Amino acid sequence: MMYSEKVLDHFSNPRNVGEIDDADGVGEIGNAKCGDIMKMYLKIDKGIITDAKFKTFGCGAAVATSSMATELIKGKSIDDALKLTNDAVVEALDGLPAVKVHCSVLAEQAVRAALSDYYTRQGIDPLPIVGEIKEPEE
Amino acid sequence: MEKRFIYADNAATTAVSDEVLSAMLPHFTKAYGNASSIYKLGRDAQADVEKAREKVAVALGADPKEIFFTSCGSESDNWAIKGTAEMMSKKGKKHIVTSVFEHHAVLHTCEYLEKHGFEVTYVPVDEKGLIDSENVRNAIREDTALVTIMYANNEIGTIQPIEEIAKICHEKKVLFHTDAVQAVGHVEIDVKKQGIDMLSLSGHKIHAQKGIGALYVRKGIVLPNLIHGGGQERGKRAGTENVPAIVGLGRAIEIACSNIVEKADIVTPKRNRLIDGILKLPYTRLNGDRDKRLPGNLNISIEGIEGESLLLMLDLNGICASSGSACTSGSLDPSHVLLSIGLKHEVAHGSLRLSIEEDITDEDVDYILEVIPKVVERLREMSPVWEKMMNGEEVK
């Protein structure tokens, strides 16, 4: 199986690993049974994602896609973050092996789960804004 | 700590040894004759093929006429199982006994036969990765055509009670095949003494090249021909002999089986030091029986981390290893072997297999034992599963 140099870079030097103690939104996606769990922490100020951190249990692609997803949304508006697609994550990593594309979907959904949590904490129903969070199939 | 390169995945494949290579080389450019040709160049090639066959036979305690060269272990397994199935179905025997944790070359062949009217009983293994021969006895029926049980498991290295199983098969008058791809060259095998009817082996696990294997078929068992064509392999498997590969396999098995006990004496203490060293990490467990296992195999589950990440991290540190995680298999399910011994999915995802040989140095062992805790700590630090475990939360 071939990982791109960028995937290996984001795996061996993942950006934004860790937690945010006073996060404004936290989302978790996946389960240990299927082998991938991503937990995403967001700090949001006036509609702008000022910080993003993650913790991931999973394969090299799971770590790399989490890392890239946080990079892609940091400094962006919530609206932009909601537009983040798994394809964009894959493209930014110079591609993923076909069997690993589901990891990029997890990364996309982890961002949405964190944003969903953010809205819930604000007392706003996240469903019309964020949509349904897709859990991976077992 | 200076970075090293350590190949600890000999159960996956091995390097062609210098001795094997030098035995093979003349057969590419000088002694290149077709073994079927009448002139001396051909006759010499034929003679070298037969010498290699004899070496394989000697290594297994078989007669050279009982050895057939194939292209790999999987081919040998396929031939033995499908061939026996075809042969025995004519007698109305359409049932096969195997185990749940066989190599896919056996499992998928059995599944194929299930789609073609055969019934298969998959004998379970216990939590130590061992098959109870009584379970095999109980699985055998009037219409059982074949029992096929692996000699040693490829992931957890556990060695099965082959002699006991063979004895039961003979009592019940059922043919017995064993996939010994992982065992040959690491444990003493004597097909006659052990009562093995058919045995598959592979060259590249014992320092021959990839693409060569053999099947031992006890005299008196007439398997259907596998490849129709010329009369090679006594008409059973046509195709011009791969003379360099066959010669290499002959030399490789001769070397591998010449000092099995001595090799085990060297490698076992090193393997045990690795096991004990890694098990010092919290939330780890050894998979498979500690004693009834291949001398060079260790398989440990490390909770809270995922296997492929671990392998990539080890690779960055120059260590080649293997895992039973789903991510290394391309499916969502972790290794069927680890699940068969009762591991939960999330634990099976974090397994590590090292398969070492006697060339590993004490410094290499030290190095591995220095690298693994660091890598595990790093991965656990970024793992939400580990976080949950440490907080006493349920891991789903």
Image (tube, coloured by chain):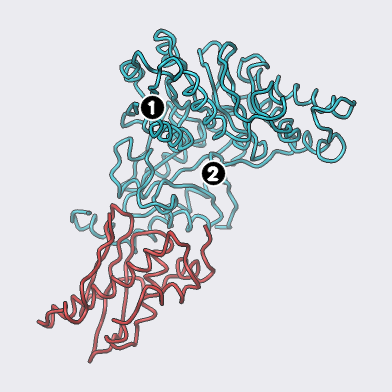
Q: Residue type at mark 1?
A: Phe
Graded by Cα atoms within 10 Å as few (under 14), some (14 to 19) or many (20 or more), the crowding at tag 2 reads many
Instruction: Give the position of the C terminus of chain B as an image quadrant.
Output: bottom left
Q: Which chain is red?
A: A
Residue B118's disc is 1
The single residue placed furthest to the top in the displayed view is B171
Q: Nearer the viewer, residue B70 or B312?
A: B70
Please state which of residues B281 and A86 is positioned toward the viewer in this rendering. A86
Left-right relation of B198 to B115: right
**Mark 2 vs mark 1, CA separation in Å:** 36 Å
Of the chain colours in the picture, the one used for chain B is cyan
Percent x, y of residue B93: 40, 18
The location of residue B81, given as percent across then percent down, is 49, 26
Q: Which residue is mark 2?
A: B9
Q: Quadrant of residue B98?
A: top left
Give the position of the N terminus of chain B as an image quadrant: bottom right
Sequence-earlier tag: 2 or 1: 2
x and y, in percent, of residue B286 in the image: 37, 38
Front: mark 2 or 1 = 1
